[in-house]
Image (cartoon, rainbow, N blue to C red):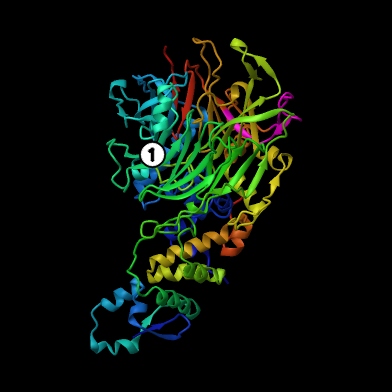
Amino acid sequence: MAPGLLSLPPEIIIEILVQLSYLSLFATVCTCRTLRAIITTSPRVQYALQASLAAVTPADESPTLDHVASRLRALRTREKNWSKLHFTGTTESHVGHRTSGIYDLTAGVYLLGESGWSDGDSATTTKAIHYVRLPSKPTPSEEVQWKRIDVGEEIIDVGLNVVEHDLIVIATRALDTTSPSAIHHTQSGTPNFWVLRLHLLSLSTGASHPLARQPVLYLGRAGAGNHRIRIEIIGQLIILLILHPPDREGDEMVVYDWFTGDLLMRADAGRGIYTGFTLLTHDTIVLPNHRANCLDIVCMPWLSPAPDWTSNHAPIEPIQEIKPILSLELPPLQPGVRLVRSTCRGEPNPHAPRQPLHPSSAENAIVIFKLFFQDRTIRTRGPYGIPLAGPVMAFAFVVHRRALCELMHLATGREHTGAAPDHPSVPWSIWGPQRTRWFEGEDIPGHWIATTCGQRYVNIPEDREPDERACIYVSDFNPLTVKRFIWETEKRVRELANRTRAVTERNVLHAASVWKCPIVSLLPYVYVASREQYEYQSILVDEGRVIGMKVSD
Amino acid sequence: MVVLITSDDERIVVEDDIAKRSGLIRDLLAAPWDPKDGDREYMGIELPIVSSDVLKKILEYCEHHKEEPFDDTYESEDMFADIDEWDLNFITADPHMAFEIVLAANYLEIPPLVSLGSKAVANMMRGKDAEEICDMFNIEKDFEP
């Protein structure tokens, strides 16, 4: 005869219960009055339950009971305010500089590039970075302090690791004055050689980062044209996707150890095949593949946390190619239509350091892909009779990071170390419809991709008249939120508000000019529209804030 | 050497270092002893709620961890995330004993083992419905939703 659970002292019962997920807690509530009483009254158990439901990482140092109770309250309030899209306050801050295209929002830091000198063509360049630590309570605008970081070179992109290392990584380019051919071309008006560098700075001081043995890393030379760099930081490692102008050298994927300055990997990324990537797990990335019209999942063994890079210099491998371990095909395109550009984002990153309170869990987070298609067979005449390709059409879809990981494990087995010469490719019709939700028109993220955090996606229709106001929409893809919403509406527990709705029905996109067949997608979500309308042109989101942008001339 | 007497009257002889993983035994051994009360080793320490099966199992744990500093805090990390392999094998070898181990470890005051056992018990509850939880833990179901 097994001894009864109830013979244990209550603190041990609580110790057991806090380990349980919401499902087991719901089952246990239905067993007996004693356990029910413990579950419904213990702040620790309630906190574990709430964290499991909201898919956030609970704060984990052994806190006192008071702390647990206040954390529980904070978490409940936050989730309730999100579900009703109730804003508790507004802080306004004036951006004093002309902004460029560079921005980021992570761990309460919002960053905007400063538009700088123009190098003769129409492209906007970035000459400095301004950032602000976002207040979590309503604050007078004069107390919101912007800081400026200028490294004296043109900035191409920026990466942040705020919580763990107070690190800002700034990728720059500068004219290579040492090359004779550069001088030659400069005289003719087109600089031909650029030096790409990575500056490793402490965010709070703007000075060289004390942990970086080499505060400036030399990335290499590059020819004329626009260079773009995508940066992700995991702990000690920086992953870069360096995109060169299409007619120049091939694109590269590079991994650095920023503590030592060692180059750990440099892989050939083809030409114009990839334009963005996001992390799937600590050692796997997902990249939309423009040539094959699919999502490539690539394992980066360099990112595995095992080796101690500091003591043992890792050998630099010869240039390798990016070899996917799995390709998830996107819906088949009409002949002539190409995927021409893509951006993607999932926040927070896997293995991101713990933020102060209740970060959404990275495994459960959604990833948003925004895809731009163009029919290359249509030719129209632009100004001065220049032939132009057809219009660019944008679509977006949402998928859970967890769903992509499960597909990876299903298709490749748990051990995904080596890339097979013929990696598996899964047709869209098999993996896609159940696991994704597609958007078009005004429902897709606009100018900014930082419209997701955890399982939420925020949106405001951007295509409006300048003085026209619009509602903010929040879509929550947490399956538990959806289940609970449906249950509450059925049981009439919740008052039916027309601002809120569960979207469980199929969505069909009929863009016959882009796809061979209509796209069906089924991933359910709950959306809520704000009670009021706002004049913001676009919005961004983090764990507890929505950032609205007003643009002036 | 310490002699531990189990609920089924078995006398188990253990090295001090191993027995002292238990806060209870540590405190008992630290308490002053009047030789007039008899030979301490011979008298032994009675553990009336711990059976010999469970005690042997717990001593196996104590022996494995005897070199480590005492940890008197209960941690609550992710389930099994940071548990070392030996501990994981130890606690999952006989799932039904996990429950008795927590009970005894709590009595003997071995916090890391209570924490490990709690995780194992929680793991047993995963995916079970109310009926199954009642059967498994000998709970009289007195609640209908």
- Examine the structure image and report whether residue A524 is included in the region drawn in magenta: yes
Residue A219 place in picture, x, y as percent? 42, 41
The residue where tag 1 is placed is A198
Q: Amino acid at mark 1?
A: Leu
Chain assignment, label 1: A
Choose between A357 and B94: the one closer to the eye.
A357
Which percent across, then down, holds residue A532?
A: 50, 18
Residue A110 rendering spot, x and y as whole percentages: 39, 30
Q: Which residue is at a point 57% across and 59% down the rendered structure image? A: B125
Q: Assign a secondary structure to mark 1.
A: strand
Residue closer to the observer: A194 or B53: A194
Which residue is rendered at x = 58% and y = 29% of the image? A527
Q: Is residue A373 above or below residue A63?
A: above
Count of numbered labels shown in the rendering: 1
**Is any atom of residue A239 visible in this view?**
yes
Q: Residue at x 51, y 63 (%)?
A: B120
Please tell me whether residue B42 is drawn above or below residue A325 in the rendered image: below
On-image quarter of the C terminus of chain A: top left
Question: In the image shown, does A487 or A354 lie closer to the viewer?
Answer: A354
- The image quarter in which residue A477 lies: top right
Farthest right residue?
Answer: A517
Assess disc 1: are there few (<14), some (14-19) or many (≥20) residues with their C-alpha within 10 Å of its C-alpha: many
A366 relative to A8 in the view: left or right? right
Quarter of the image where the N terminus of chain A is located? bottom right
- In the rendered view, tell whether residue A475 sits above or below residue A239: above
Q: Which span is picked out in magenta?
A: A505-527
Residue A356 visible in this rendered orientation of the protein: no
A261 horizontally vs A251: left or right: left
Q: What is the quadrant of residue A437 in the picture?
A: top right
Residue drawn at the location 67% of the way across and 50% of the way down = A423
